[in-house]
Amino acid sequence: MSQDLPGRMLRLLSLLQTRRTWTGDELAERLDVTLRTIRRDIDRLRELGYPVEGTTGTAGGYRLAAGADLPPLLLDDEEAVAIAIALRTATRGVAGIEETAVRALAKLEQVLPIRLRHQVATFQAAAPLPVPWSTGPTADPSTLALLAAACRDHETVTFTYRRGSGETGRCRVEPHALVAADPLWYLVAYDTEHEEWRLFRVDRLTDPAPTGHRVTPRALPAPDAAAYVAERLAAAPARYTLHATVPADAATVRARTYSLPGRVQPVDETTSTLDLAADNPRHIAEQLLGINLGPDDTIHGTPELAPHLERLGRRLLRAARALTRHSENGDSQGTGTRRE
């Protein structure tokens, strides 16, 4: 038996865990061995309990199937640290994942080498668990996992989808990518029935099912999935809109309003235009709090938005006047927490 056999089999197992299916020739080339050696190593993995399946077809190949027990995962240093950090932070927008993530993190940290455990501990000290500010819609973790696998394997899936109007229908799509746009998750996919690219909110998606049918990936009509999501969200119709000229450079306005790409356009080095749109007027109001608007004649938008902004303005003004009165009366408690 070759002295390099244990290391080669570990590398083979690692390759099988990184992709759905490998041909024998691909594995042989990666490991710089013969196809016959690959077959023998596959047999040894099976003897050790790893469920390696052989696939049929023109190319044939091997894949690591789901087994009765979860097989050990092989991670390099960077992957292990990345997963640990992700488990500390990836709790928003996914239903019921907080406790599960903490349990998984505890198991991972138990087996981390000391050098990597120190890196994770340093991050935890500097960045504790996030405060759950958002209480909006959340996605089911099992649905996300199924869709992620379908994106990876280019496998067509079906599901029931509920539109914003409440109408539901069955869809058959070719998944391309999952994109998190806090706090929502979106599926970018090609709708085979309507023959067009579409954007699906994962929290409105139920009963997903893989079809077993794989397809050749299509070219996305955007630089990447994140850009596609940003473009579609920016172009989506909304109940309330506001357009304004802002006396600040575009980079500052984008940062302070958390606007999608394309919503802020530069006019010159000190002026930019801002386009906001939302079905909830509170979202627009919150974005406006971080900036100073320009002259009144440069502000346009949905008239129905005005009373919502006015009510918010009155509430803030009432709070400011109350603080001023307390200060004048020497009644300040001085117990507020400073926020940077």
Image: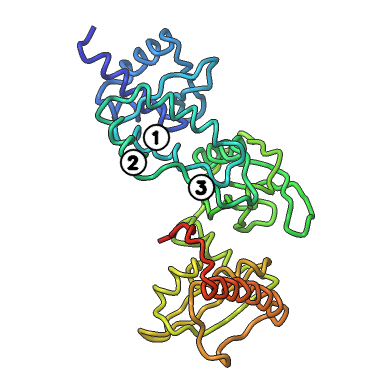
Mark whose residue sits in front, 2 or 3: 3
Separation (CA) of disc 3 from disc 1: 18 Å
Question: Can you say whether 239 is above or below 28 in the image?
Answer: below
Question: Can you say whether 175 is above or below 287 in the image?
Answer: above
| Image location (x, y in percent) of residue 321 | 59, 76
User: Which amino acid does the dot numbered 3 rest on?
Assistant: Val
| Image location (x, y in percent) of residue 12 | 34, 23
Q: Residues within 10 Å of mark 3 (few under 14, many from 20)?
A: few
Separation (CA) of disc 2 from disc 3: 16 Å
Is there a contact, CB below 8 Å, between mark 1 and mark 2? yes
User: Which amino acid does the dot numbered 1 rest on?
Assistant: Ala
Which residue does the image show at 41% across and 9% down from the upper left?
Answer: 48
Is there a contact, CB below 8 Å, between mark 2 and mark 3? no
Residue at the bottom extreme? 297
Q: Residues within 10 Å of mark 1 (few under 14, many from 20)?
A: many
In terms of secondary structure, where does tag 2 sit? helix
In terms of secondary structure, where does tag 1 sit? helix
Comparing 92 with 265, the one in front is 92
Please tell me the numbered disc located at residue 123: 2
Which residue does the image show at 34% across and 29% down from the upper left?
Answer: 75
Please tell me the numbered disc located at residue 84: 1
Comparing 179 with 323, the one in front is 323
| Image location (x, y in percent) of residue 187 | 58, 50
Please report whichever mark, 2 or 3, sits nearer to the chain's N-terminal start: 2
Please report whichever mark, 1 or 2, sits nearer to the chain's N-terminal start: 1
Is there a contact, CB below 8 Å, between mark 3 and mark 1? no
In terms of secondary structure, where does tag 3 sit? loop
| Image location (x, y in percent) of residue 144 | 58, 40
Question: Can you say whether 131 is above or below 288 in the image?
Answer: above
User: Which amino acid does the dot numbered 2 rest on?
Assistant: Phe
Comparing 233 with 213, the one in front is 233
Mark whose residue sits in front, 3 or 1: 3
